[in-house]
Image (cartoon, helix red, strand yellow):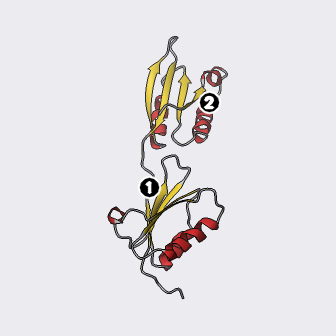
């Protein structure tokens, strides 16, 4: 972790302003994995708990002249994993038979390709795919066809990863 956006709140405070909104705006603008380097004329103690609740740790360093630099770093939290109902433990699934990068496709093309691939493969085989967004409309289609799935966003939050375990062929109504 080495990327930080810097915000010096000393000018805001010296002009009589309140820096909290500027700090929260800077936090909202951070890229995934990016931290905030805050320069303040004092230790911003109340901000430590606010940032902790937002998923950041902090390091405090006194600068020459009495100002403080606080580096707020995102905590390493694994992205939550979405699992289909009644899915057998994905840890026991075989390695994927097919790897697909569908990040350059617009909806509904990723869903169309994944469903076609699932129809082509045999029961128990696994598809791994990378998508540019979470495939919320794909989930009910997979379940309806008897397939299992597990997925989550990568650590950057930019790509969605999904594994689909092909189920027994279920006739569609």
The image shows residue 100, relative to residue 37, as above or below, that is below
Q: Earlier in the sequence, mark 2 or mark 1?
A: 2
On the image, the x and y values in percent for residue 38 come to 54, 27
Q: Residue at x 48, y 47 (%)?
A: 155
All told, the count of numbered labels is: 2
Vertical side of 143 occupied by 109: above or below:
above
- Report x, y in % for residue 58: 44, 31
Q: Which residue is mark 1?
A: 80
Percent coordinates x, y for residue 156 in the rendering: 52, 46
Front-lying residue, 71 or 131: 131
Outermost residue toward the left? 92
Q: Which residue is mark 2?
A: 18
**Element at badge 1?**
loop
> In the rendered view, does 95 fall on the left or right side of 28?
left
Q: Is residue 96 above or below residue 37?
A: below
> Which is in the foreground here, disc 2 or disc 1?
1
Q: Where in the figure is residue 110, as x and y percent of width and height?
A: 59, 65
The answer to whether residue 71 is visible is yes
Residue at position x 32%, y 65% in the image: 92
Q: Is residue 132 above or below residue 58?
A: below
In the shown orientation, is residue 158 left or right of residue 106? left
């Amino acid at each position: 972790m080495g990327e930080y956006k810097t915000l010096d709140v000393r000018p805001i405070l010296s002009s009589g302003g309140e820096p909290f909104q500027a700090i929260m705006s800077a936090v909202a603008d951070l890229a995934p994995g990016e931290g905030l380097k805050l320069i303040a004329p004092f230790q911003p103690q109340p901000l430590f708990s606010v940032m902790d609740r937002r998923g950041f740790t902090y390091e405090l360093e006194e600068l020459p002249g009495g100002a403080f630099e606080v580096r707020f770093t995102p905590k390493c939290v694994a992205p939550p994993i979405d699992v289909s109902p009644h899915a057998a433990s994905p840890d026991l699934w075989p390695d994927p038979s097919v790897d697909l990068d569908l990040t350059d496709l617009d909806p509904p093309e990723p869903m169309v390709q994944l469903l076609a691939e699932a129809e082509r493969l045999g029961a128990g085989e696994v598809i791994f795919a990378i998508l540019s967004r979470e495939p919320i409309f794909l989930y009910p289609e997979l379940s309806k066809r008897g397939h299992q799935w597990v997925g989550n966003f990568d650590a950057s939050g930019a790509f969605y990863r999904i594994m689909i375990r092909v189920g027994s062929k279920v006739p569609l109504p």
